[in-house]
Image: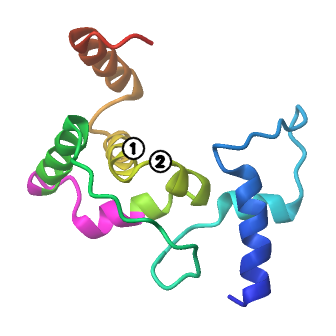
């Protein structure tokens, strides 16, 4: 990808990042270029030009460790392997990929995989989320 092509994609992607919201027409009418940026699949983030990221040594939160353990258990039980998990994560698209925290992408891909492979239904997932939220005292 050329430098000017990257800069153009970065400008468009920045405009659709979760932190900045521009309302779209209803029904939505978007350009092909905008659609291309929404659906751009990241296959290998490594090696792409980017701005420097400041390293912060922060402890993992409890949900992050639980997510890691859940995803490892899914691998041990044969639901997926690490390559499949990574591919599913890449398929989230650039906006979600860069807009979610690291383990947020993991748990989203776990849920999508469990549903797409028929291990659970969306209703079962929603019921379990409600049950756990209630147990932990999380308000909507």
Residue under the point 22% across and 64% down: 81
Residue under the point 81% across and 59% down: 34
Where's residue 88, x and y in %? Answer: 41, 59
Q: Nearer the viewer, mark 1 or mark 2?
A: 2
Instruction: Pick whichever, 30 or 119, lies toward us.
Output: 30
Judge from the rendering whether residue 101 lies leftward or rightward of residue 13; answer left or right: left
Q: Residue 26, labelled with which disc?
A: none
Q: Quadrant of the C terminus?
A: top left
Q: Quadrant of the N terminus?
A: bottom right
Where's residue 48, x and y in %? Answer: 55, 81
Quarter of the rendering containing residue 118: top left
Judge the density around disc 1: few (<14), some (14-19), many (≥20) Cα neighbours within 10 Å.
some
Residue under the point 77% across and 65% down: 11
| Whether label 1 touches label 2, CB < 8 Å | yes
Residue that numbered label 1 is attached to: 108
Disc 2, SS: loop
Disc 1, SS: helix
Quarter of the rendering containing residue 37: bottom right
Which residues lie in the magenta part?
76-87
Where's residue 100, x and y in %? Answer: 47, 48
Residue that numbered label 2 is attached to: 100
Q: CA distance from mark 1 to mark 2?
A: 9 Å
Residue under the point 66% across and 60% down: 39
Residue 111 versus residue 9 in the image, above or below: above
Residue 8 versus residue 82 in the image, above or below: below
Judge from the rendering whether residue 37 lies leftward or rightward of residue 115; answer left or right: right
Judge from the rendering whether residue 36 lies leftward or rightward of residue 85; answer left or right: right
Judge the density around disc 2: few (<14), some (14-19), many (≥20) Cα neighbours within 10 Å.
few
């Amino acid at each position: 990808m050329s430098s000017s092509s990257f800069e153009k994609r970065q400008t468009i992607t920045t405009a659709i990042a979760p932190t900045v919201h521009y309302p779209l027409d209803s029904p939505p009418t978007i350009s092909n270029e905008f659609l291309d940026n929404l659906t751009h699949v990241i296959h290998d983030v490594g090696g792409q030009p980017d701005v420097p990221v400041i390293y912060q040594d922060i402890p993992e939160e409890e949900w992050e460790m639980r997510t890691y353990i859940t995803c490892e258990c899914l691998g041990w039980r044969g639901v997926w392997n690490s390559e499949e998990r990574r591919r599913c994560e890449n398929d989230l698209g650039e906006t979600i990929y860069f807009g979610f925290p690291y383990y947020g992408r993991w748990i989203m891909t776990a849920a999508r995989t469990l549903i797409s492979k028929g291990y659970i239904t969306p209703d079962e997932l929603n019921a379990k989320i409600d049950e756990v939220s209630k147990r932990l005292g999380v308000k909507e």
